[in-house]
Amino acid sequence: MKSSSMITNAVIVNEGRQQKGSILIREGRIAAIYEGDVPVEVSENSKIIDAGGKYLLPGVIDAHVHFREPGLTHKGDIYSESRAAVAGGITSYMEMPNTVPQTTTQERLAEKFALAAQKSLANYSFYIGATNENIDELLKTDFSKICGVKLFMGSSTGNMLVDNCKMLEKIFDRVPGLIAVHCEDTEIIRKNTELFHAKFGEDVPFSCHPAIRNDEACYRSSVLAVELAHKYNTRLHVLHLSTDRELSLFCNNLPLSQKRITAEVCVHHLWFTDADYERYGARIKCNPAIKTATDRERLFAALLNGTIDTVATDHAPHTLIEKQNSYFRAPSGSPLAQHSLVTMLEFYHNGYMTIEQIVEKMCHHPALVFWVKERGFIRTGYWADFVLIDTACLWQVTPENIYYKCCWSPFEGQKFRSAVTHTWVNGNLVYENGRFNESPCGMALEFNFKV
């Protein structure tokens, strides 16, 4: 008999329901799911892990992270940030191309995959980045192995802003895979920046960030992306929605399987508001900006009613020294992957959403939007990616229990009522109550690509 392990005495949360049961893992996959008693011969030949009645969820799929390798590894790297991710229940991630050098060619993509194969504790894929000049590289992409094209339709660094109208048309028309877009209008941001710089000089208050990168900048860019997607029937995924105004561009009356245009919200846009800039300053400076309490309320409602399809992090670590600069010099982005699931579980504790809904938006729907093969659900034959959570564990985020390489979090001091106790990746127990098993590596994700 092949070596196997079994998770027993769990409350399995999957596909809209809960059931008490056990799961048999064999060769990294789910071999069987038992409700009620487990056959004696199975339990006797398996390594048993008793879940103690806790909730067992599919592993979280975070489709939007920046792990900073290569070139920016003083902020984070594939090893450090995947380690933090599995501690937070993330078993698969999709990483962005704005590294140094940027991931805008097939050769750069291959280099990242080689690094991840050696270093990643979680499963992985990488976006190829679009530029004004690399359409030929985009068209070489094998979308059964690559999650998608990342397109900056707004303010960006380096040469990754695609602002050539003819090139935008070509990308939306010719790329057969999913296009994930960052939508902010550069010209609006430039004009607002000039106004606030004239008023404050270099000492612009961080509270002005949502006025500089305002809702009009987001809306105008998102309108263009959605119009192009409709014109060319493109698979479009709009990243990190931050405004109420953008929600009118998306529909909630279609099942996800029929949607060609989907949307994401990130945990920080559901948690913080513009009132928090006074307390947190640069720690919550991100692009697009965190906006008003009304925006946060409408985004949350849109997540629940199906207008917004997925939850991600936009995990983007910077050092505290970098963040402790004045407004224009402090980079945008925050480290979030370790704390995204427990943050969403606070909404469960507060009665705003169910655990089943959290699983849908963080596990099932990312798998469906990106056509991830054999992950995101607890189904026989699927890869055994799980997270076990204790919903009766009060703990506080401190520098001592943060695993990001940058060693800080915007959630420092926050008390959470749930904790991730165990994480399995491809059947391997990689995280258990603060201890890591770093010998198994994650695997490259595969996708059920179809034109």
Image (tube, grey):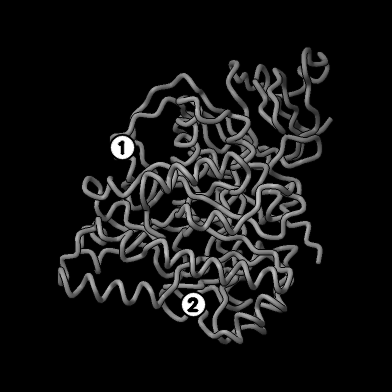
Foreground residue among 98 and 73: 98
Q: Nearer the viewer, mark 1 or mark 2?
A: 2
Number of numbered tags placed on the structure image: 2
How far apart marks 1 and 2 lie (CA) works out to: 36 Å
* Residue designated by label 1: 400
Foreground residue among 247 and 395: 247
- At x 49%, y 75%, the residue is 102
- At x 16%, y 70%, the residue is 199
Q: Tell me if mark 1 has few (under 14), some (14-19) or many (20+) residues whose alpha carbon lies within 10 angstroms of its own.
A: few
Q: Is residue 230 visible?
A: yes
- At x 43%, y 73%, the residue is 156
Query: Relative to 113, is 197 on the left or the right?
Result: left
Query: Relative to 240, is 229 on the left or the right?
Result: right
Q: Position of residue 171 (x, y in %)?
A: 65, 78
Query: Which quadrant: the C terminus?
Result: bottom right
Q: Position of residue 411 (x, y in %)?
A: 34, 40
- At x 58%, y 16%, the residue is 52
Q: Residue type at mark 2?
A: Met
284 vs 397: above or below: below
Give SS at disc 1: helix
* Residue designated by label 2: 160
Query: Which quadrant: the N terminus?
Result: top right
Q: Residue type at mark 1?
A: Glu
Query: Relative to 25, is 347 on the left or the right?
Result: left
Q: Position of residue 177 (x, y in %)?
A: 71, 67
Give SS at disc 2: loop
Q: Tell me if mark 2 has few (under 14), some (14-19) or many (20+) residues whose alpha carbon lies within 10 angstroms of its own.
A: many
